[in-house]
Amino acid sequence: MMNQPSQLEFGSIVGERYRIIRTLGSGGMSRVFMAEDLKLPGKHWAVKESIADPKIMKIVRTEAEMLISLSHPRLPRIVDFFEYPPSGAVYLVMDYIEGITLEAYMRGYQGCIPQEQIIPFALQVLDVLDYLHTRQLPVIYRDLKPANIMLTPEMEFKLIDFGIARSYKSELDQDTIKLGTVGFAAPEQYGTGQTDARSDLYSLGALLLYLCTGGKYSEWTAGVEGYIRGELPRHLIPIIRKLLRHHPEERFQSAEEVVGELRRSANFQSAQPGKSVSNASSDYAGTRVVAVLGVSSGSGATHTAIAVSHYLARKTHSVALVELHSTAKAFARLQEVVEGIPVGQASSSRRFEVDGVHYWRQTSRADVISLLGGSYRFIVLDLGNGQDNERLEEFLRADYPLVVGSGAEWRVQDITGLARSLQRHPQHKWNYCLPLAPSGAVRRLRKELDHDKVFALPFHSDPFERDDEMDQVLDELFRGVITDTRKRRFRFLKQQH
């Protein structure tokens, strides 16, 4: 509720033109009413009443003039301003927007906004933030939160409250007034510096995290990754993490930059049928996920995942290889050898390193989500030959889904059977890897699947070591994506011998 008593009631007239009908909402600093226009019968407006300290009335007047100058389809038009010095009351008259707040929508839909609406929502908010931030005198909104976003019947989003918006003044070190909503406001809004465009971008990150966790979280804290909805687009996670960095210089620096990243990553995620990896954007800055799934036991999924990971590590930086199976044993055995641990004695750490590749043994989906928020350029998921729901979902959502199966004539049905069982899912991104398969088997499978991304993997006894023939195949598989080359060799197995 507004701390000060309202000067208005039903039937009150503001500015000799606007008659109050009912209260729409109230907060600590203001109250909003619906009013009818006495000069335009049938026209309704929203009238926002605030009580201003007489000492800052000049600032309030300047801010009102600034708001009246704004014109954007996702902002309500502010058409009039009145002030009553004796009481300190000021009134803004603006468009009445039909709909419900995003906060109310989330409550009504049990905290679940459809996943296909989240990125369009983000782009709509970024559109209006870019408009505000790029004005000759930039406007910082400072209170982006679910209660200040109206969702119209057409599912469009509009900002509805400019109570603490301010014009950015570059000569100031910090804000005079510290305002914002806890959980959505950037750290600098509490006295550590002046708010600028990056403060609104932090709030956007908080808002997106709120939507992605069903309204449970708006700050990135320990354990939050366990509440992120599983069906959401992967590329959102590193973007949200960057938006929520504590220091403004570590965040995206403009709304335009976030829009560019969203579009690049979305295009990368949803490459059109027939496009190879080389058609994807090579300057994608987020974390890319390679998922390796074996069609049957002994197909070579783990061997292939290791080879791919070390290939990527030689070509670029920061690669994680994740064993997505809580009971798998392969990585535990490898860790025993790498760290000199007695056989059967488990290490206290689930992470170990082999020649620049971070191995994560026996991990869960929550661990994967947490790693996506980090600094890895590539995450390779070793899914084994398991096709339970969790691992299958990770395979289907990966940027590079790799199916590993036998090219033998009598085993080819394993691969075609998997493809048929998942035919309701898009398969244009899939890559099929056939260890030791002859060229004839590759041609037959390409024809049977009507799919050109089928690769024969050569004999490669040491997946940690560079092999020219294997590199040629992987160069083709990742063609056009990797530009940074590092020449490194790993002789782990030879040293053990």
Image (cartoon, rainbow, N blue to C red):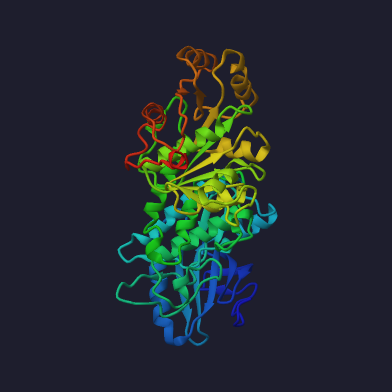
- Quadrant into which the N terminus falls: bottom right
Task: Tell me how many marks there are.
Answer: 0
Q: Image point 54% across, 74% down: which residue?
A: 49
Figure quadrant of residue 465: top left
Relative height, residue 307 to residue 82 (above, below): above
Q: Quadrant of residue 403?
A: top right
Residue at (39, 73) in percent of width and height: 194
Farthest residue, direction front: 497
Say which residue appears at 49% left-offset and 21% top-offset. 436
Is 383 in front, or is 263?
383
Q: Is residue 389 above or below residue 185?
A: above
Taking the image as shown, residue 97 lies to the left or right of residue 326, namely left
Q: Observer-nearest residue: 81 or 105? A: 105
Given residues 412 and 64, the one toward you in this image is 412
List x then y, in percent, for residue 254.
37, 57
Q: Is residue 97 visible?
A: no
Please say whether residue 245 is visible from this viewpoint: yes
* Image height of 494 relative to 432, above or below: below
Say which quarter of the image contains residue 22.
bottom right
Where does the image place residue 442, in percent across and percent down from the top left?
48, 16
Q: Position of residue 494 (x, y in %)?
A: 43, 38
Residue 3 image offset from top left, x and y in percent? 60, 81
